[in-house]
Image: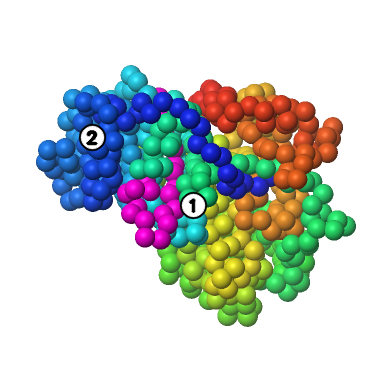
């Protein structure tokens, strides 16, 4: 099944506003939101404002913590008479906020949660363009929820209107979310049109297929030059070889490690298909490395026509055991790499700029708050890049290709996990030919977010809600990999929260 993801309208459900009665922590830069929350708070418990600073300080109902200090966040909790019921985390710099949300989540989990805590990561911005770092918290939130259902996190983006005080808009959005079911959508946007949540929507199987009337999307051009990050191995190598099968192309593969004999032979195989293929050792997290690598491609071949950003690493660990360094390492390849590649190719006449995202971005995964954050970043980054393209500041379709797990590649899962996921989710690992077909479909559809799953439809729809295509349900099909069967419509009748909880249960059992 091929699907896309986007924001769709969903008015906030009604519910009791009981979350602003207990102890509340409000992380904001200037105390403006904390002040407003104090005025709305109906209980006797304190509302504690928390600002970023250079040392841990206590002053009445205000605290200062160092974002990067686990001790400061632990001291903040230890200094409260009772554990917080609600946390509104609204620091304006998302990268600093990520560090703080991580340390706070860790401190909460290490102390043990006897009652649920709602943690809203809220971000105000005035731009209509997506803020990828703000949206990336959706991946963090979903993963954290899998690890401990008592830590209920949400990522809330608030688009402020011209002249509107950000703290007013933030308070309005927080109150709407806190009045809603605690298990409501993990990610939402509040803007002038109301509230929107993320929806996965199936793409018609025929759209963009060869011979159909849909637009042809992006083609691999003969003589074209393509930069593929992610070592000369795994999926990067697979798609380099695929491009060489499609046309006589120039390929620059980028990774940090030296070529092994096996990989050198693989490159020779690709060259035998007619491609001019080179390998450069470079770190995509280093802007200078990315710039000289792109310059080397232009020097050799004249211009660059496409980018496939496949680089990434995993540092899986449950939140209580994870370190800030591990998070930085995971973000370096995917997040910094994408930003540097985009900046370095801003002036190139690209046909496409593709990044490899993961299902973890949309479903979360225990042990992967960082990887899900980075993957979810790529999805939003892709849509943000489309805004720049519309403004004439970028060229080439932006495509975040959301992969489930593959049978091949360095990030494949072990046999036990594969068996479990197949039995419970009906999800089977992507075989090379299915993945390659999805890659071609992603180029044809040329959408900023394009996902593929290979699954038994009924089981999948129980746990990962993918709506029928816009404009009506897809044709029922016996082949589980395409079309929308009765399970899809049945599952679509359920609330978001039901679906998310089932998924949470299944993934938690995986113990990944
Ligand atoms: N395989 C799967 O099941 C699966 C599922 C979902 C998504 N994905 C995504 O698809 C992509 C490729 O997956 P894969 O299985 O092929 O992984 P892989 O075999 O581990 O290849 C990724 C390679 O990226 C390179 N890399 C990491 N950081 C880098 C950096 N800063 N600069 C340059 N290169 C860097 C590493 O090679 P060096 O050590 O040589 O740098 C690494 O081996 C990943 O981004 C992953 O998130 C894969």
- Seen at 12% across and 38% down, the residue is 60
What residue is pinned by disc 2?
Answer: 47
**What residue sits right under mark 1 in the picture?**
192
The residue positioned 48% from the left and 30% from the top of the image is 14
Q: Secondary structure at mark 2?
A: strand
Of all residues shown, which one is farthest toward the right? 211
420 vs 407, nearest the viewer: 420
Mark 2 vs 1, N-terminal side? 2
Question: Would residue 444 be found to the left or right of residue 325 on screen?
Answer: right
Q: How many angstroms separate mark 2 from mark 1 (CA)?
A: 28 Å
Query: Which of 314 and 403 lies nearest the eye of the viewer?
Result: 403
Q: In the image, is 432 to the left or to the right of 75?
A: right
Query: Under tag 1, what secondary structure?
Result: loop
Identify the residue at the far top of this view: 114
Measuring from the top left, give residue 309's x and y in whole percent.
57, 58
Q: Residue furthest left?
A: 59
| Magenta-tinted stretch | 150-170
Instruction: Name the residue located 72 percent from the left edge and 64 percent from the top edge.
Output: 218
Q: Residue at x 55, y 36 (%)?
A: 363
Q: Is residue 167 magenta?
A: yes
Q: Is residue 136 visible?
A: no
Any mark on residue 432, and which?
Answer: none
Q: Quadrant of the N terminus?
A: top right
User: Where residue 182 sits: x, y (%)?
Assistant: 45, 28
The quarter of the picture where residue 2 lies is: top right
User: Which of the two discs, 2 and 1, sits closer to the camera?
Assistant: 1
Where residue 152 appears, x then y in whole percent?
A: 42, 30
């Amino acid at each position: 099944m091929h699907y896309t993801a986007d924001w769709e309208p969903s008015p906030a459900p009604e519910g009791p506003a009981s979350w602003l009665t207990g102890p509340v922590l409000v992380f904001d830069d200037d105390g403006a939101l904390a002040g407003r929350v104090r005025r709305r708070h109906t209980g006797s418990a304190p509302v504690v404002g928390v600002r970023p600073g250079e040392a841990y300080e206590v002053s009445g109902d205000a605290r200062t913590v160092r974002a990067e200090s686990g001790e400061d966040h632990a001291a903040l909790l230890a200094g409260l008479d009772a554990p917080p019921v609600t946390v509104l985390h609204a620091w304006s710099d998302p990268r600093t906020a990520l560090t703080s949300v991580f340390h706070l989540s860790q401190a909460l989990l290490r102390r043990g949660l006897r009652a649920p805590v709602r943690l809203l990561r809220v971000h105000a911005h005035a731009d209509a363009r997506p803020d990828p770092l703000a949206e990336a918290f959706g991946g963090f939130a979903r993963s954290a929820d899998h690890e401990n259902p008592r830590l209920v996190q949400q990522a809330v983006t608030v688009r402020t209107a011209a002249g509107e005080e950000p703290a007013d808009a933030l308070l309005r959005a927080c109150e709407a979310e806190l009045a809603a079911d605690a298990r409501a959508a993990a990610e939402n946007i509040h803007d002038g049109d109301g509230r929107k949540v993320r929806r996965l929507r199936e793409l018609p199987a025929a759209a963009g297929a060869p011979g159909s009337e849909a637009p042809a999307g992006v083609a691999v051009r003969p003589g074209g030059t393509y930069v593929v990050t992610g070592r000369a191995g795994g999926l990067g190598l697979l798609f380099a070889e695929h491009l060489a099968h499609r046309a006589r192309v120039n390929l620059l593969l980028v990774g940090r490690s030296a070529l092994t004999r096996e990989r050198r032979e693989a490159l020779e195989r690709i060259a035998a298909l007619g491609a001019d293929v080179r390998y450069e050792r470079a770190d995509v997290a280093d802007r200078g490395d990315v710039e000289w690598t792109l310059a080397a491609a232009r020097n050799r071949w004249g211009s660059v026509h496409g980018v496939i950003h496949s680089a990434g690493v995993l540092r899986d660990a449950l939140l209580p055991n994870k370190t800030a360094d591990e998070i930085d390492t995971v973000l370096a390849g995917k997040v910094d790499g994408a930003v540097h590649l985009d900046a370095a190719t801003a002036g190139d006449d690209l046909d496409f700029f593709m990044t490899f995202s993961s299902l973890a971005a949309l479903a979360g995964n225990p042990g992967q708050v960082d990887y899900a954050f980075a993957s979810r970043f790529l999805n939003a980054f892709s849509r943000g890049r489309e805004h720049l393209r519309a403004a004439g500041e970028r060229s080439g379709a932006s495509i975040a290709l959301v992969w489930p797990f593959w049978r091949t590649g360095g990030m494949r899962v072990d046999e036990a996990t594969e068996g479990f996921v197949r039995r419970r989710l009906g999800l089977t690992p992507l075989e090379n030919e299915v993945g390659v077909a999805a890659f071609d479909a992603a180029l044809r559809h040329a959408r900023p977010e394009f996902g593929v799953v290979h699954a038994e439809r009924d089981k999948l729809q129980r746990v990962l809600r993918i709506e029928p295509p816009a404009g009506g349900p897809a044709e029922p099909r016996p082949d589980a990999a395409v079309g929308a069967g009765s399970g899809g419509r049945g599952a679509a009748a359920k609330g978001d929260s039901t679906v998310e909880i089932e998924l949470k249960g299944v993934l938690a059992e995986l113990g990944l």
